[in-house]
Image: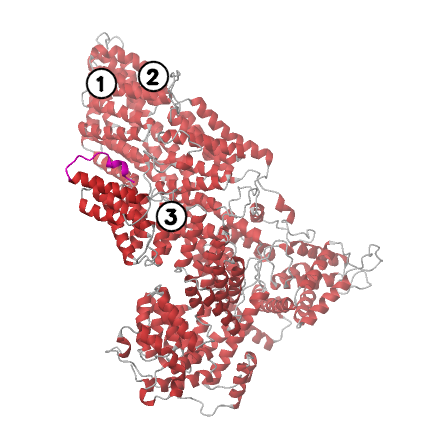
């Protein structure tokens, strides 16, 4: 990896160039990474690291493997020369246009630049036109809502923009920013292949434009497409890969990439948030919570990614923390889909599902394709017993992203609630197909098979086995497996699972009726197997508990002693549970 | 943008309506003269008035004409005023350049209307009565305009701009065409202008050509659904008088499809189908898919559906159509996916129009989803899965007390159980049936089926679902045809009961199916649920329009007025016709089984002639199969194969069609008769492959295949193997309760034993077969069993010849009346043999008694090319002639005998296009 200093220089230039072209979110991203680069200890001054201080605790806690400090060997990163500005002297018109642009007066900005021919001016003009078209499109969408929900509003600038950019591209008088815009336009027009090509060209010649990378990412929906891209090896590519791996549900790969990057960008909030998200997908909630707490300490007005945090708080049922978070984001920015989602989560946790639905609806109004809001709204409708609405919401989520296993799971649950377990199986199957490592999904599917209508116990056992293999935290699978095997009259297997269950409960120091049940079964099982020693062990353990089992254990012990001493056993069978 | 799909009843102001308003304004300009300014005569004025009336009436059409089309029409009616009118309209339209212009325009319009008390008309003044058609139209337009928001007005303005711009480009091309045609409009242009214009025209023309080519290419791939394209075409026809008399040729249809594409394209022109109309279109397509099956093109329709979905994302029925489309193209995964998607979105509350909207609970009706899913699994040949799903459907519909769905589900289950062989249903049909089957699971499949059928019928009757009742009656008839009714519980003193099927019951059931049609005749259109009337309307549009579109005396060019919405072309829906038709098919089958060939044939013919339109392609194929089989049995192979050829042309020979199966059957039989045993075995194997396909095992086909296998072995004189095959076949038939087939198999066993020389062993089989035949009233089969029995007796020795002859004579009426060529010939030969072996019979005394049947047999066998039997017949003839002392005739017969024996032993490989074809294909 190139040295920190060169990285810093690259980013500094890039930020200036990006913000000069009004690519604000890209420049924001670049700036975040810039301050995320760890300071050399030599130049360590308190004022420099003030921003970074808070993070140290978490890094100490979670940096388990020290891969971060060693850059991967054998990867030669190309150094892309920082682009020289073609217009040394900013035209006055450009300055005016940029100020108009900053005031969101896009058409005005474009108009000012109508006769300018510099690359920068051309880009800004086109970009302003594009944004003007987008703005108008969104307004029209509301104005023209048809009775069938169709809104055929389009960005009317696309056609002329495409024509102009295509000519520029053909004449080879286009800069990487122009290429980015061209890719954007092509994507919107549905010409995905060309868009990909153009965007790749853009990021290869100017890698610091994160917006271009993000567009490229949205065009890579499968691993095959990703592998087909011809990307040169810049350190920005690592960011891209990490991000796209996460999108493609390759969480472990993504996580290792991010951890690698953290070696250089130690204090980047962005990376921290992404790691949190990856860990969330891997269901490591404890760590996610710590990371987010840390992140909020450093960056208290952050709204991005906070919906993930709220999900964690929701699963951990932290009422006050969630309400605090909700309060905080609403103070920061009320009309962000994330904010609405967090509030929705809070109400859902409080059991006020109607209100929660209102907020999810608002989130969806702000962003129609906000996936998790659809899914979460589905959950709320399930809670409200409005299954058709839930099904509808889930289905929309699935149609936006067919790989969203939560929505598939929700669909399955909804149908199971309606007493259609066989129909629900289809959805559970889909869900486990996309997320085979989640034990809850397997358990849900198993319960479906187990339902009295289907009663397909063999299949249920198979599902529970899968669940038990993937870290079943709630410890349902082993117990159910044991019971099912007992019901199917397979005592050997039942004993095996009871034993395993028992071991696990001991390891986790749990108490409860399950232990007694397991002990009871094992005692009687070994007794009938004539393995009196084992049976005795379990019987003695049973003596520690109160209740009828204790008496049974006593009599079992008595029976065994009689049997061992050679007397014919009388009627021990009476005491079988 | 105007590409918004209108809500029913919404009256949106569009550029077209604005231009109509302009015309109305011209027509009724508030002036004092009786004939206002531009018009030179009253008739001219009136003509415009009539035209405007027509225009206003058609303003709820699916498609609004573009400006150039309007201009063309104006040209037709305007006569001398043509230029003035078009100029006025276009200039007025293009003068509308700001929202305020629009406001002013509509204010002006208001002045055209008379006051509310303008009933008293002043002389010489044209004032539009607000209650007249035109007045109403104007008022509606003004109202619609006033309801618009400012944004709406802006959109209207931009739309008018597009409307004019499009017209200008295409208008010039129209001019160009005129130039090409006659060149008479040319004089007014000076040379220079001419040049310039020519250039422009050329350019435009090229563009148009390119566009046309593009659309042609697209339409080539697209192969648009006929209905919609013709629909568009019709509108084109009425709008463009030039192409009015075109045939529905390739050119116009490609143009039309281009038109549709443009309409679907959101950037294009105006596409105003209402929700109802699209629903109607979709329903019609659904019918078409179900009718034509896989001959419907998959991708083209998929494309249309995708476009529709883009236009109307909330129209979920598109998903259902996709499901159907995938279903009939055997795409399991997409079908499954789309089915789930459809029901997830619609919650079962749209579609399925036959469900009365009474039980509208808010929980959705997902049981219908289950019903569909079950039927899908059935279609894809997963009977067990289907049964599981249907079981769930039963439970859920009971839970939601959706009796209609329950009835349909039960019917579907009956269908499943009767179509697909289950040896046992235990474990599948379980608890949910306890309310219906209180007896428990100790019943056999057939008994369960019977109970289900009864329950389903009762339910359907109480719910007054006529079609379902009829379908159930048919299913009942089918059941009665092949099953003996036994009491479900047999305890207590055994009541005396005859263990027979009862043809009368079958007839009764079939007959009650017909009541359906009469009920529909008198009740008319109770079936019209949503969308149905739109379909009717669409159909109406497809009829050729009156060609007097724009003639002077006929101003109302629109035959399709809104009133046609409520009249239906036929009061009997297609599905009912299909049901009634299938009852004829059932009849034909019943008669086939009972052994009345003429009646079977008659019923099949009735079906083929009367219900061909309404029938699905598989039913139509079935009836053809029946007729061809009839031909083969009664007229010989030549005719049968000729008929087969026409049938093959008519039906696409898909992999597992009935036609293909029948072809194999025919080939097999002919090969057996000719003695091509290798070929016979090959064909037989092919049949076997068809029977054991990946889709569910077709029991009927399976028995057929192994029956033929046994026959082939028998013909090859491998008796023990043949007997083994037949035996295992019988076991299977017994297991799956295929009793009619059992009778046939038993008869075959008897024949095998007879041919192997074990007549004594054969006798019990023949007798068993006879008793089966009696039980099921299989009269023809019974006659043939009697014949075999006679043959068996005969082969026991000459002292049994008398018994054999009596038996034979008893069966003769049936055999001669209804039997096929082979059966008759066999009967004749056996008769002759009986006489010959009877020691008390002397040939010389009564030679014709023997010779006559033999000659007849030989004649009949000629058509079948049945060498073995022919040889036997000639052999017997030769013996008789020998005994009679007629050496010449004896030599002749002996020669024929030799020929047939030779060809039997050395089957020469005859040219046979059909057969070589099949083997290549297979």
Dot 1 surroundings within 10 Å: few (below 14), some, or many (20 or more)? many
Is circle 3 on the same chain as circle 1? no
* Mark count: 3
Q: Which span of residues is magenta-colored?
A: A565-577
- Decide: marks 3, 1 in contact (CB < 8 A)? no
Residue A397 forms part of the magenta stretch: no
Residue B387 occupies quadrant:
top left
Q: In this view, does B653 lie above or below A505?
A: above
Q: Magenta stretch mostly in which secondary structure?
A: loop
Mark 2–mark 3 distance (CA, rounded to whole Å):
64 Å
Indicate which disc residue A448 carries: 3
Q: Nearer the viewer, mark 1 or mark 2?
A: 2
Q: Which residue is drawn at 43% across and 65% down?
A: A313
Taking B713 as reference, is B87 above or below it? below
> Which numbered tag is attached to residue B698?
none
Tag 1 and tag 2 share a subunit: yes
Residue B72: x and y, percent? Answer: 62, 61
Mark whose residue sits in front, 2 or 3: 3
Would you say residue A572 sits in the magenta stretch?
A: yes
Residue B295 at x, y percent in the picture: 41, 47
Q: Looking at the rendered structure, which numbered label has been put on residue B876? A: 1
**Which residue reaches farthest left?**
A566
Q: Which mark is residue B812?
A: 2
Specify the quadrant that holds the N terminus of chain A: bottom left
> Within 10 Å of the Cα at label 3, are there few (<14), some (14-19), or many (20+) other Cα atoms?
many
Q: Is mark 1 on a helix, strand or loop?
A: helix
Q: In this view, does B541 lie to the left or right of A22?
A: right
Q: At which x and y percent is residue A14?
A: 40, 84
Question: The residue tagged with tag 3: helix, strand or loop?
Answer: helix
- Secondary element under disc 2, as helix, strand or loop, is helix
Image mark 3: chain = A
Chain of the residue on which disc 2 is drawn: B
């Amino acid at each position: 990896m190139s040295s920190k200093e060169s990285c810093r220089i690259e980013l500094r230039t890039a930020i200036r160039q990006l913000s000069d072209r009004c690519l604000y979110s890209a420049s924001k991203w670049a700036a975040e990474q810039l301050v995320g680069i760890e300071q050399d200890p030599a130049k360590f001054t308190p004022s420099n690291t003030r921003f970074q201080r808070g993070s140290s605790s978490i890094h100490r806690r979670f940096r388990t493997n020290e891969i971060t400090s060693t850059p991967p060997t054998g990867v030669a990163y190309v150094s892309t020369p920082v682009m020289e500005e073609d217009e040394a002297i900013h035209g006055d018109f450009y300055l005016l246009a940029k100020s108009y642009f900053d005031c969101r007066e896009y058409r005005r900005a474009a108009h000012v630049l109508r006769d300018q021919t510099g690359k920068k001016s051309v880009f800004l003009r086109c970009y302003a036109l594009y944004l003007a078209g987008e703005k108008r499109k969104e307004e029209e969408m509301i104005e023209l809502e048809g009775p069938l929900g169709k809104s055929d509003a389009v960005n009317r600038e696309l056609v002329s923009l495409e024509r102009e950019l295509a000519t520029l591209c053909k004449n080879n008088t286009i800069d990487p920013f122009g290429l980015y815009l061209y890719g954007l336009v092509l994507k919107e027009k549905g010409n995905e292949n060309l868009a990909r090509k153009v965007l790749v060209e853009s990021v290869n010649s100017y890698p610091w434009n994160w917006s271009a990378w993000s567009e490229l990412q949205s065009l890579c929906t499968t691993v095959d497409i990703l592998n087909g891209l011809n990307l040169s090896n810049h350190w920005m590519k690592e960011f891209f890969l990490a991000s796209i791996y996460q999108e493609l549900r390759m969480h472990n790969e993504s996580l290792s990439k991010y951890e690698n990057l953290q070696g250089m960008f130690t204090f980047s909030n962005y990376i921290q948030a992404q790691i949190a998200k990856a860990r969330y997908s891997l269901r490591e909630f404890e760590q996610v919570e710590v990371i987010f707490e840390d992140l909020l300490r450093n960056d208290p007005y952050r709204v991005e990614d906070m919906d993930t945090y709220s999900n964690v708080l929701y699963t951990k049922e932290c009422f006050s923390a969630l309400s605090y978070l909700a309060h905080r984001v609403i103070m920061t920015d009320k009309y962000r889909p994330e904010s609405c989602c967090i509030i929705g989560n809070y109400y859902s946790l409080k059991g006020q599902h109607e209100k929660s639905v209102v907020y999810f609806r608002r989130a969806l109004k702000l962003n129609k394709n906000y996936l998790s809001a659809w899914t979460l709204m589905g959950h709320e409708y399930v809670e409200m017993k409005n299954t058709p609405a839930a099904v509808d919401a889930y289905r929309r989520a699935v149609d936006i992203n067919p790989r969203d296993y939560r929505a598939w799971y929700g669909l399955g649950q909804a149908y199971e609630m309606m007493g259609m377990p066989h129909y629900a199986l289809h959805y559970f199957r889909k869900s486990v197909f996309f997320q085979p490592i989640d034990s809850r999904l397997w358990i849900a599917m198993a319960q479906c098979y187990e339902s009295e209508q289907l009663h397909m116990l063999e299949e249920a056992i198979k599902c529970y086995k899968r669940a038990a293999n993937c870290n079943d935290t709630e410890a349902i699978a082993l117990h159910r497996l044991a019971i099912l095997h007992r019901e199917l009259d397979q005592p050997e297997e039942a004993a095996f699972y009871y034993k395993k269950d028992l071991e696990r409960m001991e390891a986790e120091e749990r108490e409860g009726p399950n232990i007694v049940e397991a002990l009871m079964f094992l005692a009687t099982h070994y007794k009938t197997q004539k393995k009196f020693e084992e049976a005795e062990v379990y019987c003695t353990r049973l003596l520690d508990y109160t209740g009828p089992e204790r008496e049974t254990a006593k009599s079992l012990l008595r029976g065994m002693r009689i049997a061992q001493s050679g007397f014919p056993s009388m009627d021990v069978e009476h005491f079988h549970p | 943008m105007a590409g918004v799909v209108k809500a029913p009843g919404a009256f949106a102001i569009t550029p077209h309506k604005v231009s109509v308003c302009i015309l109305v304004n011209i027509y009724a300009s508030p002036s004092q003269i009786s004939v206002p300014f531009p018009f030179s005569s009253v008739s001219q004025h009136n003509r415009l008035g009539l035209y405007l009336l027509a225009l206003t009436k058609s303003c709820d059409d699916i498609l609004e004409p573009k400006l150039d089309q309007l201009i063309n029409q104006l040209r037709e009616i305007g006569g001398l005023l043509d230029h003035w009118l078009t100029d006025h309209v276009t200039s007025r339209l293009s003068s509308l350049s700001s929202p305020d212009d629009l406001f002013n325009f509509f204010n002006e319009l208001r002045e055209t209307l008379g006051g509310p008390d303008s009933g008293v008309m002043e002389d010489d003044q044209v004032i539009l009565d607000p209650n007249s058609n035109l007045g109403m139209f104007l008022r509606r337009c003004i109202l619609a305009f006033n309801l618009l928001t400012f944004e709406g007005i802006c959109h209207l303005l931009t739309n008018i701009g597009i409307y004019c711009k499009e017209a200008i480009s295409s208008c010039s091309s129209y001019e160009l065409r005129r130039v090409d045609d006659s060149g008479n409009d040319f004089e007014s242009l000076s040379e220079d202008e001419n040049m310039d214009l020519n250039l422009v025209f050329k350019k435009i023309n090229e563009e148009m050509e390119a566009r046309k080519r593009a659309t042609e290419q697209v339409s080539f791939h697209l192969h648009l659904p006929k209905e919609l394209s013709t629909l568009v075409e019709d509108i084109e026809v009425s709008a463009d008088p030039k192409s009015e008399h075109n045939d529905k040729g390739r050119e116009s249809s490609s143009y039309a499809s281009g038109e549709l594409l443009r309409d679907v394209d959101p950037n294009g022109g105006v596409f105003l189908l209402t929700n109802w109309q699209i629903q109607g279109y979709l329903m019609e397509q659904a019918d078409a898919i179900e009718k034509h099956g896989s001959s419907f093109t998959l991708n083209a329709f998929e494309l249309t559906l995708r476009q529709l979905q883009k236009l109307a994302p909330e129209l979920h029925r598109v998903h259902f159509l996709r499901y159907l489309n995938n279903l009939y193209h055997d795409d399991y995964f997409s079908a499954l996916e789309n089915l789930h998607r459809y029901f997830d979105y619609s919650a079962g509350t749209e579609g399925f129009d036959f469900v009365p909207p009474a039980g509208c609970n808010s929980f959705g009706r997902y049981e219908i989803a289950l019903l569909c899913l079950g039927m899908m699994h059935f279609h894809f040949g997963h009977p067990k899965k289907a049964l599981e799903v249907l079981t769930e459907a039963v439970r859920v519909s009971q839970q939601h007390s959706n009796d209609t769905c329950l009835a349909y589900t039960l019917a579907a289950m009956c269908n499943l159980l009767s179509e697909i062989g289950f040896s046992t249903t235990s474990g599948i049909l379980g608890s949910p049936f306890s309310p219906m089957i209180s007896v428990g699971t100790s019943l056999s499949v057939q008994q369960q089926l019977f109970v289900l059928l009864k329950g389903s019928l009762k339910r359907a009757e109480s719910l007054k679902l006529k079609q379902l009742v009829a379908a159930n009656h048919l299913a009942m008839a089918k059941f009665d045809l092949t099953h003996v009714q036994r009491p479900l519980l047999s305890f207590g003193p055994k009541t005396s009961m005859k263990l027979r099927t009862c043809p009368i019951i079958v007839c009764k059931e079939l007959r009650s199916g017909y009541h359906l049609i009469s009920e529909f005749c008198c009740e008319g259109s109770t079936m019209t649920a949503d969308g149905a009337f739109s379909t009717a309307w669409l159909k109406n549009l497809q009829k050729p329009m009156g060609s007097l579109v724009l003639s002077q005396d006929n101003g109302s060019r629109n035959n399709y007025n809104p009133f046609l919405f409520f009249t239906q072309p036929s009061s009997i829906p297609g599905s009912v016709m299909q049901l009634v038709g299938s009852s004829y098919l059932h009849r034909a089958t019943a008669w086939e089984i009972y052994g009345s060939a003429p009646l079977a044939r008659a019923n099949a013919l009735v079906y083929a002639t009367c219900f061909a339109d309404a029938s699905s392609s598989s039913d139509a194929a079935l009836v053809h199969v029946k007729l061809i089989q009839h031909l083969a049995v009664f007229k010989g192979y030549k005719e049968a194969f000729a008929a087969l050829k026409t049938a093959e042309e008519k039906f696409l020979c898909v992999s597992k069609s009935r036609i293909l199966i029948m072809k194999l059957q025919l080939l097999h039989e002919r090969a057996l008769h000719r003695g091509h045993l290798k070929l016979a075995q090959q064909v037989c194997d092919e049949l076997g492959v068809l029977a054991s396909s990946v889709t569910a095992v077709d029991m009927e086909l399976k028995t057929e295949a192994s029956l033929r296998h046994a026959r082939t072995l028998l013909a090859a004189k491998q008796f023990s193997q043949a007997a083994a095959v037949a035996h295992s076949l019988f076991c299977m038939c017994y297991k799956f309760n295929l009793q009619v087939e059992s009778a046939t198999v038993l008869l075959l066993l008897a024949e095998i034993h007879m041919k192997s020389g074990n007549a004594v062993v054969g006798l019990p089989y023949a007798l068993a077969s006879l008793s089966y035949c009696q039980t099921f009233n299989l009269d023809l089969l019974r006659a043939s069993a009697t014949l075999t029995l006679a043959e068996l007796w005969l082969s026991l020795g000459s002292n049994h010849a008398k018994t054999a002859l009596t038996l034979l004579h008893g069966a003769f009426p049936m055999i001669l009346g209804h039997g096929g060529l082979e059966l008759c010939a066999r009967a004749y030969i056996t008769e002759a043999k009986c006489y010959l072996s009877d020691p008390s019979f002397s040939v010389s005394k009564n030679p014709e008694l023997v010779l006559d049947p033999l000659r007849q047999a030989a004649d009949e066998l000629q058509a079948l090319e049945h060498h073995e039997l022919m040889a036997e017949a000639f052999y017997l003839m030769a013996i008789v002639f020998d005994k009679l002392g007629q050496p010449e005739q004896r030599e002749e017969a002996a020669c024929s005998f030799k020929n047939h024996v030779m060809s039997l032993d050395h089957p020469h490989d005859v040219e046979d296009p059909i057969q070589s074809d099949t083997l290549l294909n297979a």
